[in-house]
Amino acid sequence: MTPVLEIAHITKRFDGKTVLDDVSLTIDKGEIKVIIGPSGAGKSTFLQSINFLVKPDSGTIHLNGLPVNPKDKKALYGYRQQVGMIFQDFNLFDHLTARANVEIGLVRVRGMKKAEARKRAEAELDRVGLSEHMKKYPAELSGGQKQRVSIARALAMDPQVMLLDEPTSALDPELIGEVHAVISGLGKAGMTMIIATHQIGFARALASEIVFMERGRILEQGSPQKLLSPDCTTRAREFCSQILDANGEDR
Amino acid sequence: MFLNGFIAVKEGLPYIIQGALVNVVVVIGALLLGCSIGLPMAIGQVYGGRMLRRIIGVYVWFFRGIPLLVLLFLFYFGLFSFLGLNLSAFAVAVIVLGLISSAYQSQVIRGAILSIPDGQLKAARALGMSDARAVFFIILPQALRLSIPGWSNEYAIVLKDSAVTYALGVAEMMARANHVASRTYQHLHLYIAAGLIFMALTYIGTKALNIAHNRLKIPGYTQ
Amino acid sequence: MEELVYLQTQVMPALLRGVRVSILLIIPSASAGVLLGVLAGTVRVYAPAPFRWLAGAYTLTFRGFPLIIQLYIWYFGLPRLGIYLSPFVASVLGFSLCSGAYQSEYIRGALLSIRQGQIRAAQALGFTRLQTIASVILPQAFRRALPGCGNEIIYLIKYSSLAYMVTCIELTGEGKILASASFKYIEVFSVVGAVYLVLVTAASWALSRIEGYLSLPGFETHKG
């Protein structure tokens, strides 16, 4: 079966510094791959290069076996519609209500009629549990609510794969749970996802595979059980135990 | 003796206030012209290439550096005659004030665009929007709202500058006050009256823009 | 060739005369404007209520009346009261009072932006009121006000051209006289415009050098 995404040999340099060094990843339908690693490892840059928000210096990407040509603008926009992205800073459109935020992609990118888009937007917001807040503006929502709206916005586009760039890093601790609940729900429903996160406990529970990045390279890949078991003596395990200790989590 | 001054003002007032209408029309025309040139320039300066940014930079430098009076003379007696265009003083006034305003407005709008966090553009692109759509539907609605205080300021400035167009013979308030003064010799009272009317017009205009600003504000959004 | 001869014998001397008058107008006006601005701005922040109100009324009126009307009032209006000012004096008076009103806004803003905490800290250390003003408030306020005040002076350079309207013949006036006689409006006013551009650009450059020299972390002015 063709993988949903085949990312091969992505390299990126910023000001002479190599931020991504020959990074490759494949993901099949329904898989959830979680990328962990220290700050500066390149997790964010990697995710943003998958939908070409950051232009890689070299490397290729195939969606369902077909190559993506970033130079062909129309193809690029079409590709981005199929790859949903959730940002650490939410990046909701500040001048639009929650509902309008979800609608705008449907109306302005997909070309849907306003009435249809409205119905879909309301359904997506209901799915993430925010129906009663749909007419509020981003400035009136809590961090957890904003992130859930941004998930609804991405889901409305019916993406084949979702990229989540540290979805809960900017949230107060008590708001993290509601976002994790939504993401777990998506996973159970079969959404293909690549998630970058510091939340090891969450990663272990959700991931089909854990990917450990450091200094622009993927150092290790493996199932959560393998990589995080007490018998494992790799760098990934070392990193995780530091975080788990700091969070007071149970190993 | 002082009383004659007030009488002159009272009698000349209707005539002078008709002039005020001319000022207002000139100002609105100039501001609209300024916005229609300034907005594309602002977009060009933020998103355009180096060459474009340089050209716009020169335009802004030129129209912000030369005094209004000099430009009025240059265009009215010089340029338009040379081009064989027979434009009225009123038209030249609107054009020159508009061109100068476009230089200032472009900087206001540019500042507003630059103050919008770049996450907004990223999110728009991530949804698959083309850059043109992202700027038009996401960036501009926010930038224009942020520019309203700047426009309020610009209105006040252009209104006062419109009095200078008297030098070309535009029949606005200043010219009319002068006309009445030359007949009645009550210059002091008449000019003070004209000045007060300018102040009133400024207050009304900025108040109106203030109300518009409050109405159009995005709820809860502070920058 | 005829153009160049014309330029040399007719245009240049007249324009040089004009520039001299312009500079003689600008320097006193700018200085007086800053002084008035500091005075009015300081009064509006620190003085008791009646003085604050007076300074506020001054600022409101002289920013509300168009400059050209102010000039006309001094030159054409005062004779009604028996006061006859020369075009030059009327111009300097008008420019100073008008500029002072705008400057007072910048000064006031700068003074208000100094956080109360700074003043309390100085008092806690035992500074007298005067020492607080000299060592804590003024150095900060000066830096904060500099961009606004500098820009106001640059505006003055441009608006000095209005002196022509009250028959004070400076650069613009000389240009108008020359051009009216010869109908060479484009040539003459291109040169006039160029001179102003040079003056304004030089002043802007000087301003940003001064700002750079005085800048401290946290007080940077971000050039757009």
Image (cartoon, coloured by chain):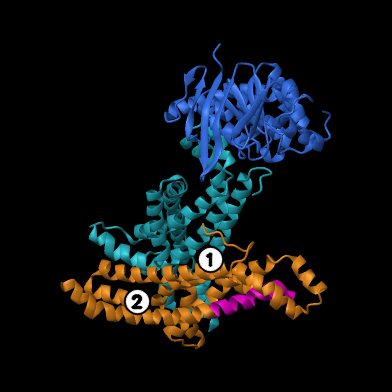
Chain colours: A blue, B cyan, C orange
**Dot in front, 2 or 1:** 2
Rendered view: B203 above or below A112: below
**Residue A187 lies in what quarter of the image?**
top right
Image coordinates for residue C9, horizontal then vertical, percent: 22, 80
**Residue C142 lies in what quarter of the image?**
bottom right
Q: Element type at marker 2? A: helix
* Chain at numbered mark 2: C
Give amino acid for label 2. Gly
Q: Nearer the viewer, residue A107 or B44?
A: B44
Q: Which residue is mark 2?
A: C173
Q: Element type at marker 1? A: helix
Image coordinates for residue A90, horizontal then vertical, percent: 65, 36
Q: Nearer the viewer, residue A200 or B144?
A: A200
Structural crowding at the residue carrying mark 2, measured as other residues with C-alpha within 10 Å and reported as few (<14), some (14–19) or many (≥20): many
What numbered label is drawn on residue B197?
A: 1
Residue appearing at x 65%, y 24% in the figure? A221
- Write down the region rendered in magenta: C32-53
